[in-house]
Amino acid sequence: MSKNKRSELLQKALLLFYRNGFHATGMDLVAKETGVSKTSIYKHFRTKEELILAVLRLRDEGFRNDLYRRMEETSETPQGQLLALFDVLKDWFKEDSFKGCMFIKASAEFQDKNHAINAQAFAHKQLLADHLAKLATQAGYPHPEDLARKLVILKEGAIVMAAMSHTTASADEAKEIAKVLLAG
């Protein structure tokens, strides 16, 4: 399988898993929807879990790069970027394709803390917290790691509420709470 074909397989598998869930998406459906035979898929990913891990890595990289870029475009200051997080979330919640967080879904479907998929989902959240802590440090907050954890909790709650309510209100509400935290 060429590099382009592998990339295309991962992109299509990402959409399938995001839309249908991990357990509900079988390899027969992946093969059918991607146009790649199961034999070819299994040559590159020994198990469905390996494919899921590759999809999560792809989603992590794409999501974080887009999120950080859009936060920087929204504000030039670290404090402004911390608040911009919620503006970017609101835009995401407006998208027709929004179906919640793939990493929350992954951790819900693979709940064992020692499972590689659960660990990969948590690693994504930790990378986001690390970035927010870096911004909080640059903005001069006294306990940047604590502030970052609280902002991640707000972010995650906003995502869950947006997915459940099918509205964007939680992004604005989380931003208002973040303003209180940042005013400290």
Image (tube, rainbow, N blue to C red):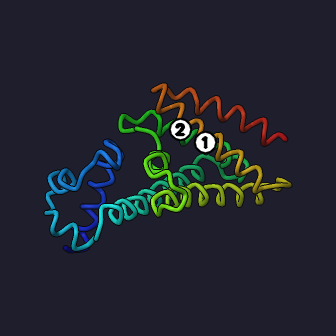
Q: Amino acid at mark 2?
A: Ile
Left or right: 142 in relation to 13:
right
Residue at 31% from the left image edge and 42% from the top image edge: 20
Residue at 78% from the left image edge and 40% from the top image edge: 181
Where residue 159 is drawn, which disc sits there? 2
Q: Quadrant of the N terminus?
A: bottom left
Q: Nearer the viewer, residue 96 or 20?
A: 20
Residues at marks 1 and 2 touching, judged by CB atoms closer than 8 Å: yes
User: What x and y, as percent, mark residue 11?
Assistant: 30, 57
Residue at 24% from the left image edge and 51% from the top image edge: 26
Secondary structure beneath dot 1 equals: helix
Secondary structure beneath dot 2 equals: helix
Q: Provide the residue designation for mark 1.
A: 155
Residue 89 in the image: above or below residue 15: above
User: What x and y, as percent, mark residue 99?
Assistant: 40, 38
Q: Nearer the viewer, residue 68 or 1?
A: 1
